[in-house]
Amino acid sequence: MAFRLKFVPEHTKIDFFRWQAGTFGFSVLMVLVSVVLIITMGLNFGIDFRGGTTIRTETSSAIDVGAYRSAVAPLNLGDVSITEVFDPTFGADKHVAMIRVQAQEGAESATPELVAAVEAALKGADPAVVFASVESVGPKVSGELIQTALLAVFGATTAILFYIWLRFEWQYAVGAVAALVHDVVVTVGIFSVLQLKFDLSIIAALLTILGYSINDTVVVFDRLRENLVKYKVMPLRDVMNISVNETLSRTVMTSGTTLIALIALLVLGGDVIRGFVFAMTWGVVVGTYSSVFVAKNLVLYLGVNREPRKPAAGPEAEGFDAVP
């Protein structure tokens, strides 16, 4: 007999609307608090959004990122990011690192004195290090990156709204997008309150969270649509409860296995990807919560047209209605 590990029973009867006012009110409160925190405390923007200098170093000896950080720390340059670059085309005696230094106050680009100071500090840690290239990102470019990042998130959300509207009904689309806005705003809010570094990798995490959250929401909505046909006279609230209970095992297993991998990366992945992984971990938790307690609540408030669509008959039928 095959052994199957089950974290959730096959047939659950949880009333997810029992705490409807509390959960929905808590979600609204989290969004409002996050917006206030973002406005008052702001975000700890990284070099991508604040501007700065990128230095590419090469050396013949193995790179010790910790030693590099310790060497430049006394210079008080603010946000400094150091990552080792791996490439299979590099020879055994070629080790490359990328050093990003935030824009200094009153300077449009890196001054020769700044580059010389960083080079002298790194040579103290590794005498063989040389600067292969030095590039600066000015305030204008960083401002354009912020605008592009906002457009990316807005465009993804709008495309999802349009798709759900076509695939289901407009009530589902409103519920799904409200859940996505909830996830993004609350995630940005936690970065504001903790003052974690917010850069382009976090934008990538936000876009990934959008995709993960909408996938979870669509699974619930699809089962809801099937059950609305199956239970024609049952109240919408009860049909929603059945739908969430029937997909609960899938939701728990998907979120649980994803969190196992993310927590491992969060603990063992190092400083370079910690911000991205933290955003993903938080986003999976919040996205699962919003799929269950935010999206379906709004659909219940808005109501759903439970009358089946009647296909057009005769030669005037067009599109999918013309398909038998």
Image: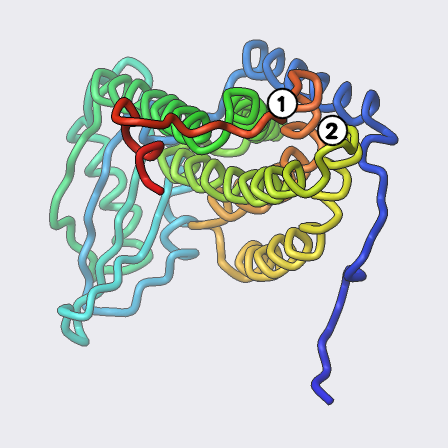
Q: Residue furthest front?
A: 314
Whole-percent x and y of residue 306? 63, 26
Residue 190, by quadrant, is top right
Q: Relative to 111, is 264 above or below?
A: below
Question: Relative to 96, is 282 on the left or the right?
Answer: right
Name the foreground residue: 167 vs 214. Answer: 167
Q: Residue at x 71, y 43 (%)?
A: 244
Whole-percent x and y of residue 80? 38, 38
Q: Residue furthest bottom?
A: 1
Provide the residue designation for mark 2.
Answer: 236
Whole-percent x and y of residue 178? 57, 22
Name the foreground residue: 175 vs 135. Answer: 175
Name the foreground residue: 238 vs 81. Answer: 238
Q: Looking at numbered disc 1 in the image, what kind of residue is underneath it?
A: Val
Check the picture and name the quadrant holding the N terminus.
Answer: bottom right
Name the foreground residue: 57 vs 281. Answer: 281
Q: Looking at numbered disc 2 in the image, what kind of residue is underneath it?
A: Leu
Provide the residue designation for mark 1.
Answer: 304
Q: Residue at x 28, y 60 (%)?
A: 126
Question: Relative to 8, is 310 on the left or the right?
Answer: left
- The kind of secondary structure element at disc 1 is loop
Q: Relative to 141, is 53 above or below?
A: below
Say whether marks 2 and 1 touch (CB < 8 Å): yes
Residue 24, by quadrant, is top right
Check the picture and name the quadrant holding the C terminus.
Answer: top left
Q: Residue at x 81, y 36 (%)?
A: 16
- The kind of secondary structure element at disc 2 is helix
Question: Relative to 18, is 294 on the left or the right?
Answer: left
